[in-house]
Amino acid sequence: MGLMTSRERFLAACRCQPVDRPPIWIMRQAGRYLPEYRQLRSRYGFLELVKTPELATAVTLQPLNRFRLDAGILFCDILVIPEALGQPYHFKDEGGIEMDFRIESPDQIDGLDANGVGERLDYAIQAIRMVRSEVGDRQAVLGFGGSPLTLAAYMVEGGCSPTFARLKQLFWRDRPNYNRLLEKITRALIEFFLLQIGSGVDAVQIFDSWAAICPAHAYDEMSLSWIREIIDALPRSTPVILYAKGMAAHSRMLASTGASVLGIDWTVQLSRVHAGLEEPVALQGNLDPLVMTTEPEIVESEARRILEDMAPFPGHIFNLGHGITPDARIENVHALIETVEGFACR
């Protein structure tokens, strides 16, 4: 096996092909743990960073410039889709996000406009082209979006919720309008993903962040059927990473969507997930993000445990089991990357 570029290594792992070592990238790579990001945030609001292509490009490149990562993910936000549909959002003074209004009636669902979503998200597409131009063929570039269920949860609840009761009641009490809402979100996501792919991303990740609110028997109908529709609409040549937090026990159902890669949180052993799959599917994960707040030697030990566990199997992309936290230590990121870089596949 010859020396692989980061991009080649990442794409080969997505397809369960041999690699010289596991590729590594870090979910939510840019953020408050980076001083260069904090410096930008002192001058610009979050949404200004997202919606200004030059700034979004700069933030996307920050971790790639500092660390030897194999892939970078576009700096954006999953809630740009509801906003493009006609439901804006903002950040509350006390922290957290809030939709400008919540979906409470069929008329409000009717008022969501899925036509021209791509034009309204052109700032993200411009940023992808800029990032691709900067990294060339050296590293992989990832696009992303929230799952229809996850976006609907914010839209119906008006923000985050401890129970997401309103969304679940909509599903149980008014299935036609639940379906109409998710149809519009799905249509917007397909357009957005196709534009991302056409603008140069190597793969897309779907974040089904609130998947665990679903009863197991209803998960396919509430969420996976819509994800399956999205994946079916995308070119087979582009890997799709599906991350469904808290749903690793349903890995066969997740794989049934046609996703190339399953992102797995830190609550399960990756080799056991691999053993439970019927078809070859790459796995991404799954270091507990809080390990990154400890010491470099702990990071090395925990990372090596995961690497050894997955060493016999092709198709492992090393990542955290969720997004990196603001209190992660930079020296721990260096230790993590050095540990993965030093681990040769057998």
Image (cartoon, grey):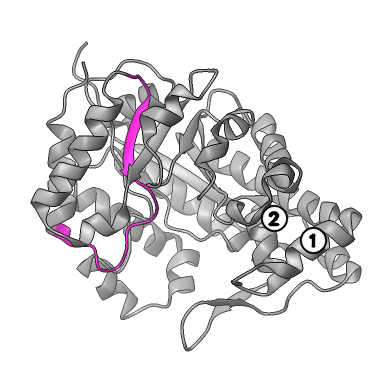
Q: Nearer the viewer, residue 300 or 29?
A: 300
Q: Residue 308 at what x, y percent from top left?
A: 22, 28
State yes or no: residue 328 in magenta. Answer: yes
Q: Secondary structure at mark 2?
A: helix
* Vertical order, 156 against 186 (above or below): below
Closer-to-camera residue (105/53) = 105
**Dot 1 crowding, Cα within 10 Å, few <14, some 14–19, many 20+:** some
Q: Secondary structure at mark 1?
A: loop
Where is residue 162 shown, x and y percent of the image?
59, 71
At label 2, counting other C-alpha atoms closer than 10 Å, the crowd grade (few under 14, some 14-19, many 20 or more) is many
Does residue 199 show up?
Answer: no
Q: Looking at the image, is 209 positioned above or below residue 166?
A: above
What's under tag 2, amino acid-wise? Val
Asked whether 186 or 130 is in front, the reply is 186
Q: Do residues under tags 2 and 1 come within 8 Å of each other at their CB atoms?
A: yes
Give how far apart the Cα atoms at labels 2 and 1 are. 8 Å
Left of 123 or right of it: where is 102?
Answer: right
Quadrant position of the C terminus in the picture: top left
- Which residue in the structure is indicated by mark 1? 113
Q: Is residue 300 within the magenta segment? A: no
Q: Is residue 79 left or right of residue 52?
A: right
Q: Which mark is residue 250?
A: none
x and y percentages locating residue 205 in the rendered image: 50, 43
- Give the number of the disc on residue 117: 2
Tell me the residue at 44%/21% (across/down): 15
Q: Which residues are magenta?
A: 313-330
174 vs 114, nearest the viewer: 174
